[in-house]
């Protein structure tokens, strides 16, 4: 499905995502701990795919379903499943910015940023770019709500400090 999406073959990508989703739902219904992570990841990817196709209602539904699964998985093993949870929060934040639901987008980015900050205290060499992009999304959400510069500039400063790669630093500077 990813290959088809990357090669601009959206119909084939969607068909494959849906087939994977059906299979993973069936497997997860039998063993949620073993197959739940793959189901959540498929829902996240399908939600992001729908976002890229401007099918926001479908994307939002899939991403929220993925979040429900990740929230349950985090209760069992936060260390292992929080990265998937934060990626899903970021994906949902991005999708919601397309529908101009700024407050909800900010909430998702804030949740992801809080987790990324904590993860970085454990592993300072990881998650810098992820944190930076979440902060950038939160800053954009605040700016789009008409909040004052003082409400979003500190987020941009923190994002610039957290960024680990030139491409992310460039995103923040743009």
Image: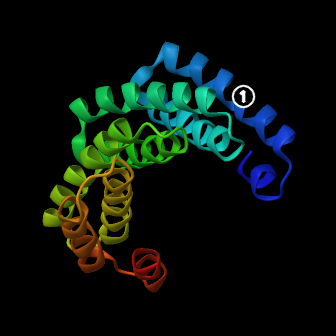
Relative height, residue 88 to residue 141 (above, below): above
The image shows residue 8 at horizontal and vertical percentages of 83, 54
Q: Nearer the viewer, residue 120 or 166?
A: 166
Q: Residue at x 22, y 50 (%)?
A: 115
The image shows residue 167 at horizontal and vertical percentages of 49, 80
Residue 125 in view of the camera = no
Q: Is residue 116 left or right of residue 49?
A: left
Q: Quadrant of residue 165?
A: bottom left
Relative height, residue 76 to residue 129 (above, below): above
Q: Quadrant of residue 143?
A: bottom left
Circle 1 is placed at which residue position? 18
Relative height, residue 45 to residue 22 (above, below): below
Q: Residue at x 35, y 35 (%)?
A: 104
Q: Is residue 24 left or right of residue 83?
A: right
Residue 36 in view of the camera = yes
Q: Nearer the viewer, residue 73 or 133?
A: 133
Relative height, residue 80 to residue 68 (above, below): below
Report the coloring of the rendering: rainbow
């Amino acid at each position: 499905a990813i290959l088809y999406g990357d090669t601009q073959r959206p119909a084939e990508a969607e068909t494959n995502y849906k087939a994977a989703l059906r299979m993973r739902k069936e497997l997860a219904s039998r063993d949620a701990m073993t197959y739940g992570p793959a189901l959540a990841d498929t829902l996240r990817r399908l939600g992001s795919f729908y976002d890229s196709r401007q099918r926001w209602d479908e994307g939002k539904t899939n991403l929220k379903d993925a979040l429900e699964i990740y929230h349950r998985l985090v209760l069992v093993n936060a260390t292992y499943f929080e990265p998937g949870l934060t990626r899903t929060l970021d994906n949902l934040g991005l999708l919601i910015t397309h529908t101009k639901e700024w407050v909800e987008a900010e909430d998702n980015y804030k949740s992801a940023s809080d987790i990324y900050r904590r993860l970085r205290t454990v592993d300072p060499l990881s998650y810098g770019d992820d944190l930076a992009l979440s902060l950038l999304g939160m800053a954009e959400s605040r700016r789009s709500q008409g909040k004052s510069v003082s409400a979003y500039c500190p987020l941009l400063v923190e994002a610039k400090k957290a960024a680990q790669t030139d491409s992310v630093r460039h995103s923040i500077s743009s």
